[in-house]
């Protein structure tokens, strides 16, 4: 039988039962390869209930450094009888199936083109451990031990990780090392090793860090000056607020008094959460909430208030599958339109699209800054794939002398000197008015904040000209925002081409690989990665230079393409949809295949 042969370039997928304790063991496997200097990109695919349903953990090992999902599985570690048939079907021909053969399975359960590796994991654990829970938990470490032999993963690396994790807990350290050794001894004595796929030490990780996007965004909020967070738990965003609380406990506590310099509130619902953030922003605090699509739906009326009253608000939207409850633990980019135009009436909001944890950190801080400067809601549009999965990225960078720019905030000294104050008056043509913070001056600079119409001095007015003045000024402010948001990143092909592609956010790792695949096929494509809405002038310029521009996104309705058409008034025929929305991260194979298929000559209709 043929077998896949590859060094430092393969995909391993673990099929487990949620709640079995497998997550930490699978993560241990991925990090051990990482510490051997080989880039990995793991993805946790889990159900939306607490325990009992299937869960998967996919690890791409790629010395070239590609971090997107590749597609296909080279080694399946099948630990869940419920999903056996589907898991076995995923394995590439010549791949490997590792399973617990304590109970024999009929030949019909196997594929003739797959290499089968059976190991009596249950029997091994039953012989050593008396407690049922111990048997369950240590079975995971036992199979990691066996895999370390089969794939030639350095045992010393794993044991060093155990020593770090269980420092001061010698009993736990010893039991985990014992379970690891049980797996290694059985594999060394009874299994054929190494497999055709295996790990060799490399030096391809460098100074990169391994972190999830939610933690990165939370740390970015700390560095960006956020002192208030209000949130309601919702998958996949809850860990943003939890990480923010952890970082605030470290960095936002007065060392002399022990008093907290932050406020974090778990509200009774999303409506209350955004209301608290709006109130904090009005009062001068840098404040944010973290949520997902259903939460944004509930928040829209307050978002409209913040837009029309011009109050700084930052909303971190970790997108998931929708609509309604949708797929709470799957990823999509399907909240683009709902956030760009959130609330009733004519509204337009700033959206930022980070591609990895580094940009989650950077753009979370930038979102807080832009919200202050523009006096408006700003959305950080991440998703489950970036937010909840650990990813290699550049180390975070921050200048120690950074000073926050609060934008047009009038001081007591300026008011005292007689500077004219009109809360909603455009004084210099950029659409952004001056504001004051509560308590700035005892008699000057006060105004009534309202969600109803008013004149430039915040006085209630239902006059059409006053309303038009404010609405057109908001448009000018949005045009100003296009000059302030992160510009797109353009990547030119190696030669002239009339083909372009636009992509954004979590599609970036797969897109970068797809461009290499296409180039190898002789298909040259210029690429533009969007990093923000409103779109800077370079975006329509890019579209105008190409006959066809593919727009790659992870939703059914081509929402980014619709936004481009609506805002830039480009010919829709020039923008070709490339859509992926089954809840899994898009792969380079899918993108390259979709673009290649579109370029093939179409058969003529024969009457």
Image: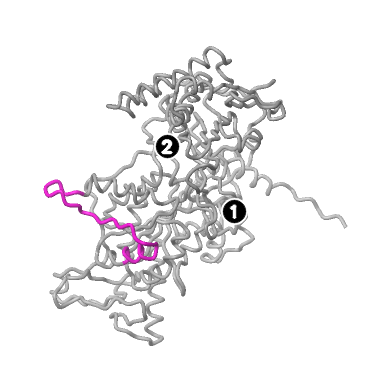
- Mark 1 vs mark 2: which is more N-terminal? 2
Name the residue located 45 percent from the left edge and 42 percent from the top edge: 389
- 350 or 438: which is nearer to us? 438
Q: Is residue 587 above or below residue 352?
A: above
Q: Is residue 448 magenta?
A: no
Foreground label between 1 and 2: 2
Quadrant location of the N terminus? top right
Residue at the outermost left position = 256
* x and y, in percent, of residue 324 in the image: 53, 60
Identify the mark at residue 549; answer none if there is no mark.
1
Q: Which disc number belongs to residue 392?
A: 2
The picture places residue 475, in percent across and down from the top left corner, at 41, 71
Q: Is residue 260 magenta?
A: yes
Mark on residue 426?
Answer: none
Considering the numbered disc 1 on the image, is that residue within a helix, a strand or a loop? strand
State the residue at coordinates (49%, 28%).
63
Span highlighted in magenta in the image: 253-278
Q: Residue drawn 46% across and 18% down? A: 182
Distance of label 1 from label 2 (alpha carbons): 29 Å
* Above or below, comparing residue 510 to residue 323 in the picture: above
SS for callout 2: strand
Quarter placement of the C terminus: bottom right
Residue 275 appears left or right of 516: left
Marks 1 and 2 close (CB-CB < 8 Å): no
Q: Position of residue 522 (x, y in %)?
A: 64, 39
Lateral position of residue 96 relative to residue 127, left or right: right
Q: Nearer the viewer, residue 408 or 353?
A: 353
């Amino acid at each position: 039988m043929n077998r896949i042969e590859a060094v430092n370039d393969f995909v391993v997928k673990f099929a487990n039962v949620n709640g079995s304790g497998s997550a930490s063991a699978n993560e241990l496997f991925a990090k051990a390869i990482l510490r051997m200097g080989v880039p990995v990109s793991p993805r946790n695919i889990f159900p939306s209930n607490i325990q009992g349903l299937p869960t998967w953990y996919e690890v791409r090992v790629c010395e070239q450094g590609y971090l997107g999902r590749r597609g296909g599985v080279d080694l399946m570690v099948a630990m869940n009888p419920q999903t056996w048939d589907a898991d076995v079907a995923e394995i590439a021909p010549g791949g490997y199936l590792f399973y617990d053969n304590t109970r024999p399975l009929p030949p019909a359960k196997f594929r003739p083109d797959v290499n089968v590796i059976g190991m009596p994991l249950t029997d091994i654990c039953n012989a050593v451990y008396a407690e049922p829970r111990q048997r369950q938990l240590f079975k995971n470490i036992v199979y990691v031990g066996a895999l370390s032999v089969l794939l030639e993963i350095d045992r010393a690396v794993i044991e060093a990780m155990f020593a770090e994790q269980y420092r001061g807990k010698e009993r736990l350290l010893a039991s985990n090392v014992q379970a690891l050794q049980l797996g290694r001894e059985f594999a060394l004595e009874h299994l054929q090793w190494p497999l055709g796929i295996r790990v060799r030490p490399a030096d391809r990780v460098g100074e990169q860090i391994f972190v999830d996007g939610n933690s990165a965004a939370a740390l970015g909020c700390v560095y960006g000056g956020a002192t208030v967070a209000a949130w309601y738990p919702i998958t996949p965003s809850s860990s943003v607020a939890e990480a923010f609380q952890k970082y605030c406990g470290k960095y936002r506590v007065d060392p002399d008094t022990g008093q907290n310099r932050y406020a974090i509130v778990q509200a009774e619902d999303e409506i209350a959460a955004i209301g608290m953030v709006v109130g904090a922003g009005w009062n001068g605090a840098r404040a944010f909430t973290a949520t997902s699509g259903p939460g944004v739906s509930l928040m829209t009326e307050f978002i409209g208030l913040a837009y029309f009253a011009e109050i700084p608000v930052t909303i971190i939207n970790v997108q998931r599958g929708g609509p309604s409850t949708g797929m709470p633990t799957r990823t999509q980019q399907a909240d683009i339109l709902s956030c760009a135009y959130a609330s009733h009436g004519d509204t337009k909001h700033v959206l930022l699209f980070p591609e990895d944890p580094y940009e989650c950190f950077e753009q979370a801080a930038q979102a807080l800054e832009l919200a202050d400067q523009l006096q408006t809601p700003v959305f950080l549009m991440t998703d489950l794939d970036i937010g909840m999965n650990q990813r290699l990225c550049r180390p975070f960078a921050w200048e120690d002398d950074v000073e926050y720019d609060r934008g047009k905030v009038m001081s007591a000294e300026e008011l005292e000197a007689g500077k004219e104050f009109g809360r909603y008056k455009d004084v210099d043509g950029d659409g952004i008015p001056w504001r004051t913070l509560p308590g700035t001056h005892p008699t000057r600079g006060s105004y009534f904040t309202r969600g109803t119409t008013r004149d430039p001095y915040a006085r209630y007015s239902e006059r059409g000209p006053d309303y038009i003045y404010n609405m057109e000024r908001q448009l000018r402010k949005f045009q100003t925002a296009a000059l302030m948001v992160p510009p797109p990143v353009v990547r030119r092909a190696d030669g002239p081409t009339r083909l372009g592609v636009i992509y954004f956010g979590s599609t970036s790792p797969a897109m970068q690989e797809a461009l290499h695949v296409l180039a190898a096929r002789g298909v040259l494509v210029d690429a533009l990665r969007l990093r923000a809405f409103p779109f800077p002038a370079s975006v329509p310029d890019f579209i105008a230079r190409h006959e066809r521009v593919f727009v790659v996104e992870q939703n059914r309705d081509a929402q980014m393409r619709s936004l481009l058409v609506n805002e830039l008034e480009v010919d829709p025929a020039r923008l070709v949809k490339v859509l992926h929305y089954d809840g899994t991260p898009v792969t380079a194979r899918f993108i390259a295949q979709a673009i290649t298929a579109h370029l093939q000559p179409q058969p003529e209709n024969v009457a």
